Amino acid sequence: WLPHDAVRIGKGWAASTAVDWNIHLKEQIDNFETVVKNLDAIIASDCVWLLKMMEPLFETINCVFERSRHAKLLLSFQRRDTKEGNNSVNFTTVDRVLITMQRRGWAVDCL
């Protein structure tokens, strides 16, 4: 079930893939159910700065969480808070991301 580019790290393996959040993962990943249920971590960096990107990203992540209860998400992004803050019509904020995650029932630790 490992992708051809998987790399051995310690006692495990790591691999990466780019996905389109607007297309269901089943259509993008070979052996979808097997791959997703074996995922331990999702690492997403600087991919949620526009409000319109947040829900598709979290829907994609939720698709993994529904199939792999042990998967964890490590999300980082550059703060682009404008002077409008949480009232911005375009940009997300740390508060908005955290609130959206908590509304989904995800446990969140903010570092």
Image: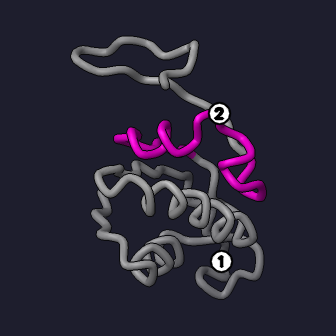
The image shows residue 25 at horizontal and vertical percentages of 66, 49
The image shows residue 36 at horizontal and vertical percentages of 48, 44
Instruction: Report the front residue among 78 and 33.
Output: 33
Q: Secondary structure at mark 1?
A: loop
Instruction: Report the front residue among 4 and 57.
Output: 4
Residue assigned mark 2: 30
Residue 40 colored magenta? yes
Residue 16 colored magenta? no
- Kind of residue indicated by mark 1: Lys
Query: Which residue extends farthest left?
Result: 11
- Kind of residue indicated by mark 2: Asp
Instruction: Name the residue at 56% across, 14% down.
Output: 5
Residue 63 numbered tag: none
> Relative to residue 102, is residue 52 drawn left or right?
right
Label 1: how many Cα within 10 Å (few below 14, some 14–19, many 20+): few
Q: Secondary structure at mark 2?
A: loop
The image shows residue 52 at horizontal and vertical percentages of 75, 70
Instruction: Report the front residue among 10 and 1.
Output: 1
Report which quarter residue 86 is drawn in. bottom right
Vertical placement of residue 22 versus 103, above or below: above
> Relative to residue 77, is residue 83 drawn left or right?
right
Instruction: Name the residue at 48% across, 22% down.
Output: 2
Residue assigned mark 1: 83
* Numbered range of the magenta stretch: 20-45
The image shows residue 8 at horizontal and vertical percentages of 36, 12
Q: How is the image coloured?
A: one colour
- How far apart, in angstroms, are the residues tagged by discs 2 and 1? 44 Å
Vertical placement of residue 39 versus 12, above or below: below
Callout count: 2
Vertical placement of residue 1 versus 23, above or below: above
